[in-house]
Structure formats: C-alpha cells, structure tokens
Image (cartoon, rainbow, N blue to C red):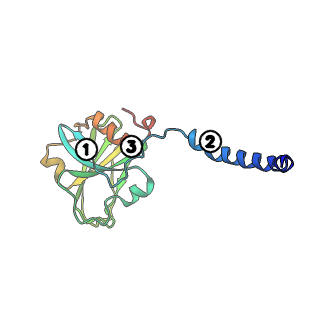
Amino acid sequence: MSRNLSAQIPYLRLILVALIGTILPIGCAENKSPEPLPLERWQEVVIEGKTIEIQIAFLEHEMKQGLMNRSSMGENRGMLFFYDPPKQMSFWMHNTHIPLDIGYFTADGILREVYPMYPMDERSVKSRRKDLLMALEMNQGWYAKNGIKPGDSFDVDSLKKALLNRGIPESRIPF
C-alpha cells in the first residue's frame, strides 16, 4: 500500500498545485473601486444655486449618441458632455427631436457661451472658444428661464462628485 501511495504522490502534488493556483488569485484579488454609474443614471449637480439632474457622456459612443431619438426630457434635466483635453466644440441635432440650448463651459466650470439648437437641424453649432471642457444640453429656453448666463458657473464640488461617480478618473478632473 505504501508503494501505491508513493506512486500517487506526484499526481497529488500536481492536483494540489493546480488547486492553489486556482484559489490563491481569488483570495488575493484587489479590492476594486465601485463600478462607475452608467450613462443612463441621472446625477445631481448645481449651477448658480439651481439643482439639475444630468447624464454624463464621456465615452466616444455616448457622445456620438447624445440625446438622439428621445421624444422628451424633464424640465431640469440635461446631458453633460465631458472632453479631455479642452477644445473648440461643435454639436448638431442629427436625429434629435427635442429643441435644446447648449452651454459651453471651460475647465473652471464657468459657462462661456450659450446657443439654441433646433430639432433635426444638422448644421453645426460651433463654439467660438477653443478652451472648452464641457457642453451641457438642456431644454430650449432653460438657461434664460433660470437666469443662467455666461459668467455663471457650476458648483464644482457637486460637479466633481458627479464626474467621479460616472467613472471619470480624478486625474482628468481639473478642479
């Protein structure tokens, strides 16, 4: 019997090594940070004391889709497009059925330009500035109705929290 056992030891060692190799990585796995919130989740931010809910698009396919094919959007809801690095921006309304206003923001969270955008209008709405980090699309007339104008700004703490929740690395957030 001891002879059979000694013949089986190499196989038992192989099985033991395989088990350890399978189990060890599971126990040593890093604690990962929470999963970022998906685009579909609304997040609260504050702009000049006004709380709004936004969806944040920062992946290329999310930016390309934007607010296309939606038939409506809540009164204080919008979509924020986050770019890195800052740049001149240009948006259009391809397959977008909601009349919108677009606000362009610099990296300090300050609103610099606002333009109306019309449903299904494929002409570009281009920014004048070339140092813009974010664009915020809201229902048409929202900026004027709420007294939000160029020079006004996001509460950067609420914006930073929303960007981090969305999965944008802190190293890419300039405030």
Q: Position of residue 53 (x, y in %)?
A: 24, 48
- Inter-mark Cα distance, 3 to 1: 27 Å
Q: Mark 1, residues whose alpha carbon is within 10 Å: few (<14), some, or many (≥20)?
A: some
- Inter-mark Cα distance, 2 to 3: 51 Å
Name the element at disc 3: loop
Q: Name the amino acid type tagged 2.
A: Leu
Work out whether mark 3 precedes mark 1 in sequence or the reverse, and give the earlier one.
1
The residue positioned 31% from the left and 60% from the top of the image is 67
The residue positioned 33% from the left and 48% from the top of the image is 127
Instruction: Please state the total of marks drawn on the protein image.
Output: 3
Q: Is residue 154 above or below residue 12?
A: above
**Numbered tag placed on residue 24 in the rendering:** 2
Q: Nearer the viewer, mark 2 or mark 1?
A: 2
Work out whether mark 2 precedes mark 1 in sequence or the reverse, and give the earlier one.
2
Q: Is residue 122 above or below residue 21?
A: below
Q: Position of residue 103 (x, y in %)?
A: 27, 47
Query: Residue 91 appears in which quarter of the rendering?
Result: bottom left
